[in-house]
Amino acid sequence: MTNNSIQPIGSNLPISFPYVYGENIESMYPDVRVSIERITPETAEKMLATNVKNRKIKHYPLSTLEEAISGGEWSLNGESIIFGINGTLLDGQHRLTSCVKTGKSIDAIVVRGIGGDTLDTIDSGTRRQLSDYVKMDGYKNYADVATIGKVLIRKDDIGIVPMLFDNNNTRHSTKAMRKFINECHDRRIEPLIPLIRLIGNRYKSIPRPMLAGLFDEFRKAGDDNLLEFVDQLAGKSPTCVPVGLLQLKFNEHGSDVSHGHGLYRKSVLAAYVLKAWNAYMRGDDMKR
């Protein structure tokens, strides 16, 4: 059998369709079977019953998959559900669990008959991050755009206060985040990038995602107010300097807050930025 005679699975395309193929070595793996299947929640439960050697379920990919399936965003993308030669599930537990929990069927490529000694090679490649997709979408400042986009979609979903002060695990699918970024880039994301870079470079201990959420909220008071506030916070204004307390807490060399960890550190930093903003909006002397 020549390479040109290989027919894509489930395809009615002519043999001459211009795909590129490697050498056909199917005969070397007689136990391997590949199929495209519609998996119902009931079938997924049965498949999960064979899941005896897999890793612990992780909340993040599970919630993201559930949102995609529930929102009708699931599509056949070439990733496969894999079973070993003895019938045990090797890869796909998060997809199958999401299928069961949402009560909706999914379409997937299913591979059966893979050797059990290959388990440690599955999912060992580098997974694409949102910034990788944003770069492919053609955005210049793709890392900043991805960071700000993730913050703003979450802020819109749960509000500014939970976003700043709670360890909320709200997640969105990559498709939903890319759609949000495409819709909001020019209006909400791009204007924040130079402001976040300015303050982020001046005060190294302030997390940039936190600045994204705060500055987006501050913009409701008008772009001119936000721009003037950022200039004052950065020490660029000739009439005002940043709040002394902020200079102490956010200095580049670290401080008591800078050495904090987790939610406490984030909450304190957010509180001081809000304190400075409120002082600015009241017209208080920023030096006090």
Image (spheres, grey):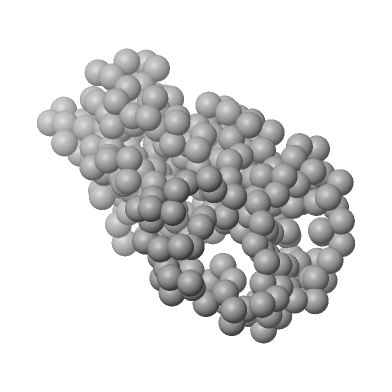
Q: Residue 73, position in %: x, y?
A: 59, 35
**Depth check: 186 or 250 in front?**
186
Quadrant of the frame with the C terminus: top left
Q: Which residue is drawn at 59% across and 71% down?
A: 122
Question: Left or right: where does residue 39 sit relative to residue 68?
Answer: right
Q: Which residue is drawn at 76% across and 37% down?
A: 104
How many labels sit on residues? 0
Q: Residue 138: where, in percent of width, then height? A: 27, 40
Task: Compare residues 185 and 235 and report the one nearer the observer.
Answer: 185
**Whole-percent x, y for residue 201 in the image:** 26, 50
Residue 25 image offset from top left, x and y in percent: 52, 77
* Residue 271, visible in the rendered structure: no
Q: Indicate the quadrant where residue 158 lies.
A: top right
Q: In this view, does 240 lie above or below 110?
A: above
Q: Residue furthest left?
A: 238
The reply to whether residue 108 is in sight is yes
The residue at 28%/19% (across/down) is: 223
Residue in the foreground of this view, choosing between 241 and 52 = 52
- Which of the 4 quarters of the picture holds residue 9? bottom right
Q: Which residue is drawn at 59% across and 82% down?
A: 28
Does residue 130 sit above or below 4 in this rendering? Answer: above
In the displayed structure image, the side of residue 24 where residue 255 appears, left or right: left
